[in-house]
Image: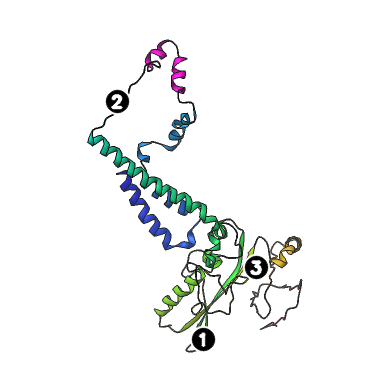
C-alpha cells in the first residue's frame, strides 16, 4: 500500500508539473524526486522522520554502547533491561529456502543501490549541465545556470510587447500578455517551454479564429540586479520561423550589456533624486542596441515627462504632441 501511494502521488504530480513549466521553482521538482526515492524504499517501516533521525544516532557510537549503558544502570531499571553479559550464539541456516531468500534480498539491494547511485551522479552532474544544454542558458551561464535564472537572480521586467502580424493583410495587432498565461516567468527564457513555446501556442490559438498566416514578434525589457532595462531577445525575429535547440546557443538572444554594470550605483542615486521630487514620481533607466527603437506611451495625466541621455546618442520622435 505504501509503494502504491507513492506511485499514485508521483505520476500525477510529475504530469501536472510538466504541464506548466513557468510555475517551477527549486522546490517543485524536489517533491517529485523525493516521491520516486520513497517508491523504491521501505520508509513506511521507519516511522516519522525526526524520530528516525534520533533513532539512528547510535549508529555513530561504539558497537558496545548499549551494553556499557545497561551496565551502569542500577536497581529496578537494571532488572527490566536485557542482560548485558549474556552471549548470543547464531546458528547458520543453510537450507535452500534461506539461501534463496538471501539471494533475492541481495538482488533487490543491488537494484536499489544502483538507482541511488544514478541519482547521486545526476545531482553531481547537474551544476555543469549548462555547458551541454546551451539552449537553456540566458544572461547567467554559471553553475546551475537555468535554475538560478528561475529562482536566485533578481529580475525586474519593465514591459513585454507581443506583436502579431497578419502576413495576408499586413495588419499589425498587439496581444495582451495575460490572455493565455497566469504569470510572467515565461518572458525570461528563450527555450521551448517559455518564449519560443509561447509564440507557437499563440499561433495555434489564433488558428481557431482563422488567422493562420501570421508572424509573431516578442519584445521583452528586463533588468538584472539593478542594471539598465534592456532587451532580452531580438524583437526583429519572427519566432515562428526561427529555430531553437537545447544543445546550441540561442542566436536571437540579446547579450547582457555588462559594460554598463558600473552604472548601477549612479542609477540608485538618480532614482533617489527623482523620488524626492514627488510621491508619484517614477523613473526608468533603459539601454538599447544601435539601430533599434522603443515606443513609450505617456498617459495624458502626466504633466512632466523628462528624458535625459546619460551616454551615447538617441533620436527622439514625439507623435500627437500638443
* Horizontal side, residue 305 vs residue 156: left or right: right
Instruction: Identify the image quadrant of residue 73.
Output: top left
Mark nearer the viewer, 2 or 1: 2
Which residue is situated farthest in the top direction here?
Answer: 75
Q: Which mark is residue 284?
A: none
The image position of residue 228, as x and y in percent, is 68, 67
The image position of residue 296, as x and y in percent, is 64, 76
Examine the structure image and report whether residue 189 is included in the region drawn in magenta.
no
Q: Dot 1 corresponds to which residue?
A: 171
Of mark 1 and mark 3, the one earlier in the sequence is 1
Q: Quadrant of the C terminus?
A: bottom right
**Helix, strand or loop at mark 3:** loop
Residue at point 45% right, 11% down?
74
Q: Dot 3 corresponds to which residue?
A: 256
**Helix, strand or loop at mark 1:** loop
Can residue 70 be seen here? The reply is: yes
Query: Bounds of the magenta span?
Result: 63-88
Of mark 3 and mark 2, the one earlier in the sequence is 2
Is 180 or 262 nearer to us in this picture? 262
In 3D space, how far apart are the residues under numbered discs 3 and 2 (Cα atoms)? 72 Å
Residue at point 53% right, 68% down?
135
Residue at point 66% right, 72% down?
301
Answer above or below: position of 275 versus 214: above
Q: Dot 2 corresponds to which residue?
A: 91
Answer above or below: position of 286 versus 238: above
Is 93 or 4 nearer to us in this picture? 93
Examine the structure image and report whether residue 80 is included in the region drawn in magenta.
yes
Is label 3 in contact with label 2 (beta carbons under 8 Å)? no
Instruction: Identify the image quadrant of residue 95.
Output: top left
Can residue 277 be seen here? The reply is: no
Amino acid at each position: 500500500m505504501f509503494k502504491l501511494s507513492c506511485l499514485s502521488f508521483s505520476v500525477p504530480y510529475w504530469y501536472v508539473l510538466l504541464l506548466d513549466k513557468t510555475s517551477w521553482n527549486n522546490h517543485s521538482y524536489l517533491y517529485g524526486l523525493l516521491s520516486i526515492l520513497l517508491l523504491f524504499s521501505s520508509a513506511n517501516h521507519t516511522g516519522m522522520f525526526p524520530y528516525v533521525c534520533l533513532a539512528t544516532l547510535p549508529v555513530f557510537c561504539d558497537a558496545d554502547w548499549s551494553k556499557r549503558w545497561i551496565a551502569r544502570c542500577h536497581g529496578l531499571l537494571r532488572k527490566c533491561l536485557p542482560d548485558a553479559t549474556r552471549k548470543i550464539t547464531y546458528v547458520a541456516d543453510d537450507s535452500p529456502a534461506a539461501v534463496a531468500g538471501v539471494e533475492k534480498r541481495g538482488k533487490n539491494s543491488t537494484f536499489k543501490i544502483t538507482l541511488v547511485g544514478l541519482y547521486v551522479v545526476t545531482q553531481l552532474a547537474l551544476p555543469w549541465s549548462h555547458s551541454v544544454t546551451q539552449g537553456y542558458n540566458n544572461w547567467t551561464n554559471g553553475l546551475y545556470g537555468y535554475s538560478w535564472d528561475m529562482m536566485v537572480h533578481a529580475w525586474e521586467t519593465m514591459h513585454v510587447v507581443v506583436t502579431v502580424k497578419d502576413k495576408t493583410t499586413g495588419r499589425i495587432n498587439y496581444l495582451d500578455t495575460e490572455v493565455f498565461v497566469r504569470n510572467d516567468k515565461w518572458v525570461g527564457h528563450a527555450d521551448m517551454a517559455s518564449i519560443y513555446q509561447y509564440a507557437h501556442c499563440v499561433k495555434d490559438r489564433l488558428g481557431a479564429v482563422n488567422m493562420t498566416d501570421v508572424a509573431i514578434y516578442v519584445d521583452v525589457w528586463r533588468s538584472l540586479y539593478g542594471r539598465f532595462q534592456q532587451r532580452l531577445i531580438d524583437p526583429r525575429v519572427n519566432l515562428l520561423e526561427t529555430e531553437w535547440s537545447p544543445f546550441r546557443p540561442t542566436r536571437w538572444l540579446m547579450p547582457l550589456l555588462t559594460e554598463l554594470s558600473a552604472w548601477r550605483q549612479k542609477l540608485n542615486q538618480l532614482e533617489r533624486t527623482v523620488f524626492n521630487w514627488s510621491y508619484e514620481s517614477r523613473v526608468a533607466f533603459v539601454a538599447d542596441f544601435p539601430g533599434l527603437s522603443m515606443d513609450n506611451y505617456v498617459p495624458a495625466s502626466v504633466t512632466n515627462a523628462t528624458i535625459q541621455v546619460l551616454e551615447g546618442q538617441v533620436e527622439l520622435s514625439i507623435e500627437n504632441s500638443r
